[in-house]
Every structure is written in C-alpha cells, then in structure tokens.
Image (tube, helix red, strand yellow):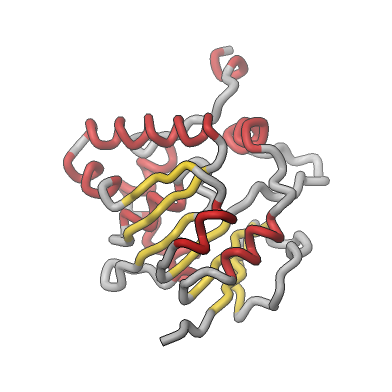
Amino acid sequence: MADQARTAPAVDFVGGAVGYRFRSQAGRSHALLKATGVSPVRPLHVIDATAGLGRDAFLLASMGATVTLIERVPDVHALLEDAFAAARAESAELAAIVGRMTLLHGDARALLPTMRADVVTIDPMHPPRTKTALVKQEMRLLRDLVGTDPDVGELLAAALSADCGRVVLKWPLRAAAPPAPRKPSHQIVGKTVRYDVFVRVRAA
C-alpha cells in the first residue's frame, strides 16, 4: 500500500538496482560505457544533460568518469541532492564516487554552450508506450514530475553544438528518432533501447 501512495520516484545510490549493480560490478558490461567510451582506464569528463534519477551518471562515475549532471526540474534536483548526501554518509567508497559528480540546476539548452566536456549524454523522457506493457513505476513517477520533454530536438541540437567530442542519445529501440541536424555516426543497440552516437571533430 505504501508504494501505491508514493508521488515521487526513488533516487537511491546505496540500495536498489543501482546499489546491486555497483556491488556486483554488473555495470562493467553496460552498453552506455561502450557508447560513451568511458572505462576505468579512460576516465572521461561527461555532461549528463538530463540527469533524471542519476543512475547513468552514477554508473559512469563508478567507472572513474567525472560527471556533471544537469537537471531542470526542481523536485528532481532536490531528490538527487538527497541521494548524494545519503551516499556520502554510507561509505567512503560511495563518497568518492559521488565526489566525481557535480549537480547543476538549470536548462541544459542554456548551459551547454558555456561548458566543455569529452561527452554529452541525453536521456530525455521517451515517447509513451503504445503497447499494453506497463512502464516501471519509477519511470511513471518521474514522468509525472518531468512531463514529456517536447523540446528534445532543441536539446539535441544544443548538445551537437557544444564543445565536446561525442554526443550520446539514449532512445527506445524501435521509436522514431527525434529531429536532429545530422544522422548518428553509429548506434549501440540493446534489448529495449539504443544509443545513437554522434562523433564530433573538435576544433584545435
């Protein structure tokens, strides 16, 4: 009954799926790492332009990346701040990981032109499913807070204009791609999502 009464998603870097993935090291084979190029021997600087529940950012930081998270929804930003504090209090190991994560409150479309990174990742709210399968509860609650992200095309254009070497868009496997000024360089395909990877040639 308690779960039915919840109105906000759980942002948790200590327990749950994120904690299990970290403790079991199951994330080391995650497609996101291949899409971004992040690895323990290649600790890149990543801007997560749509922080959401922070799970992808935590995975990247646990692999050694320095991650700047941008979240524009005040309630979600507050949930992330609480999760950061809980992780710092839990252990020195988790504190070191979130120490590589910097949380910003703002609109990535406005912030990206002022920033520089190796990679920019975008994981907007995906189009509603048309099939009968239920979306996971956390995603339903997050959608209630965030909405539908109708400006994903503008966000992708801002990312592709940013000072970075690669842009990674996470999108449902079979959904039509959002409008973009160019086609992806390649894709990393999973069971339910794909990562559209845009490799950019940076100015010297």
* Residue 68 quadrant: bottom left
Q: Is residue 125 visible?
A: yes
Q: Nearer the viewer, residue 108 or 2?
A: 108
Q: Nearer the viewer, residue 67 or 155?
A: 155
* Residue 44 quadrant: bottom left
Point out residue 126 in the picture as x, y percentages from the top left corner: 69, 50
Q: Residue at x 60, y 64 (%)?
A: 158
Q: Residue at x 37, y 39 (%)?
A: 13
Point out residue 17 in the picture as x, y percentages from the top left corner: 44, 41
Q: Nearer the viewer, residue 67 or 92?
A: 67
Q: Is residue 194 above or below residue 134?
A: below
Quarter of the rendering occupied by the N terminus: top right
Q: Is residue 165 above or below residue 82?
A: below
Q: Is residue 161 left or right of residue 60?
A: right
Point out residue 186 in the picture as x, y percentages from the top left corner: 60, 79
Quarter of the rendering occupied by the C terminus: bottom left
Q: Is residue 161 left or right of residue 79?
A: right
Residue extending farthest left: 92
Q: Nearer the viewer, residue 114 or 200?
A: 114
Q: Residue at x 55, y 66 (%)?
A: 168
Q: Residue at x 28, y 61 (%)?
A: 64
Point out residue 35 in the picture as x, y percentages from the top left corner: 50, 70
Q: Is residue 111 left or right of residue 96?
A: right
Q: Is residue 183 above or below residue 131?
A: below
Q: Is residue 188 visible?
A: no
Q: Is residue 199 above or below residue 87?
A: below
